[in-house]
Image (tube, grey):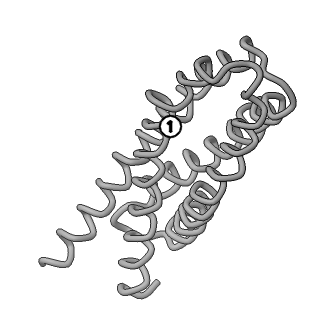
Amino acid sequence: MAQDTTTWLLLIQAAATWGMVGLIWFVQIVHYPLYTKVGPEQFVTYQQAHTRLVSLVVIPLMLAELFAAVLLAVAKNPLFPTTAWVALALVLAIWVVTFTVQVPQHNRLCQQFDLQTAQQLVRGNWIRTFLWSCRGGIVIWMLERWVNLSKV
């Protein structure tokens, strides 16, 4: 893979991943805990708006992150051959948790407020928060190695 292409993929990956790291921590610490303050009468409308609006931010970032992670892993760059695959595995783990756990919980909450489901959503989201935080560290490490190579 050309040096310029790798640079752009690393930058795309870093921007998308760190966009998601910031967003997931905000959601985990601020947004999800406030679910219980909305009230059952207004909750379904609130949740439907949340799901629609957050998708406008999350979908492009997650797709960009996946795209960059796949291309970096298959490129077999000698600077981070294993690390790129670990980074991709983390993306895939995030997608699995998102679409098998979080999305079904959001869908249930779009139908009616259920305190147990809301609490499970908050607790279970720590998995994605941890995975994205780990990815953030790996992505910075990959970028740092690439930048230091450029100096040589």
Query: As drawn, is 151 to the left or to the right of 79?
Result: left
Q: Position of residue 140 (x, y in %)?
A: 30, 55
Q: Residue at x 66, y 43 (%)?
A: 50
Q: Residue furthest right?
A: 111
Q: Position of residue 10 (x, y in %)?
A: 39, 69
Would you identify the image quadrant in which residue 77 lies?
Answer: bottom left
Q: Residue furthest left?
A: 152
112 vs 116: above or below: below
85 vs 38: above or below: below
Q: Position of residue 102 (x, y in %)?
A: 71, 34
Of residues 135 and 19, the one drawn nearer to the viewer in this rendering: 19
Q: Residue at x 57, y 58 (%)?
A: 57
Q: Position of residue 46 (x, y in %)?
A: 69, 36
Element on which disc 1 rests:
helix
Q: Which residue is mark 1?
A: 131
121 vs 17: above or below: above
Q: Residue at x 58, y 19 (%)?
A: 37
